[in-house]
Image (cartoon, rainbow, N blue to C red):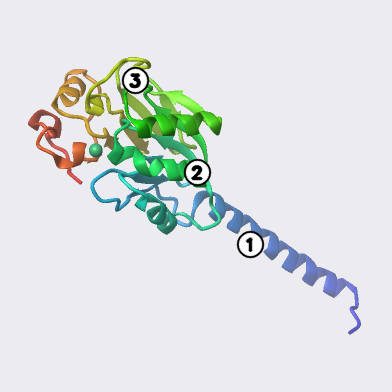
Amino acid sequence: MIFNFNKNTKNKLYFWGGVLIIVIFIWSFIFKYGADGNLKIYFLNVGQGDAIFIETPEKIQVLIDGGPDNSVLSELSKVMPFYDREINLLVITHPQKDHIFGLIDVLKRYKVDNILFSSIEYKNSLYKELSGLVKEKNINKIEAKAGVQINLGEFVSMDVLYPFSDMSGVKVENPNNTSLALILKFFDRKFLFSGDAELKEELNLSNSGLDIDVDVLKINHHGSKTSSSVLFGKNQFYF
Ligand SMILES: [Zn+2]
């Protein structure tokens, strides 16, 4: 076939070239900000434990806790594309088995960029193994305490409300009441995650004067009777 490069063909080329550029621009926008621009929060089905996966409109991914077994891996594969082996931020609310067991394999199979946790001293072989992996993989550690704010792109941020001060090296028997309390903000929507906080931490938070008036509360300590005090739960939706 002879390709006549006359003026007419040139104009056609300009037209289709322009269309192509617009299509590429739209697709790159969709790729960057997602098809819907929504914040996605998945409460993964890991049985008696917690594992929460968050994806911002800019595809920044956060995993809060990893559940009591390896089921977090199959759950993650349902919400992350198979080629995506990177998690931008891993949050450990507190180092008990039902929150950290699954994280050992997550750290082995995914590239984790940052980890947010409170480095309390707590005797637990899993926690020791987890800390060893974090060190070995040279993951950036962020010590959690009130005032720390993490910007997860342009539209989403995460504020640490609790513990009130640096807990590194503090010996702890029951870590539930050292659970990180975090508020995730997306425009004017707020979500509160506070691990297995019991009455003591809930009262500390309620009495602190901090704004914990949120749209969604991840119910503390899996809904056990030691948590969700009336004072804390007033006017909240429970999940
Ligand atoms: Zn728990």
Name the foreground residue: 117 vs 218: 117
Provide the secondary structure element on which disc 1 rests: helix
Name the foreground residue: 71 vs 87: 71
Number of disc labels = 3
Which callout, 1 or 2, points at the residue further toward the start of the chain? Answer: 1
Q: CA distance from mark 1 to mark 2?
A: 38 Å
* Residue 172 location (% of width, % of height): 27, 20
Q: CA distance from mark 3 to mark 1?
A: 54 Å
As drawn, the label of residue 23 is 1
* Residue 17 location (% of width, % of height): 74, 64
As drawn, the label of residue 235 is none
Q: Which residue is mark 3?
A: 121
Q: Residue at x 30, y 21 (%)?
A: 163
Location of residue 14 with respect to 216 vertically, above or below: below
**One can see residue 166 in this view:** yes
Amino acid residing under circle 2: Lys
Decide: marks 2, 3 in contact (CB < 8 A)?
Answer: no
Which callout, 3 or 1, points at the residue further toward the start of the chain? Answer: 1
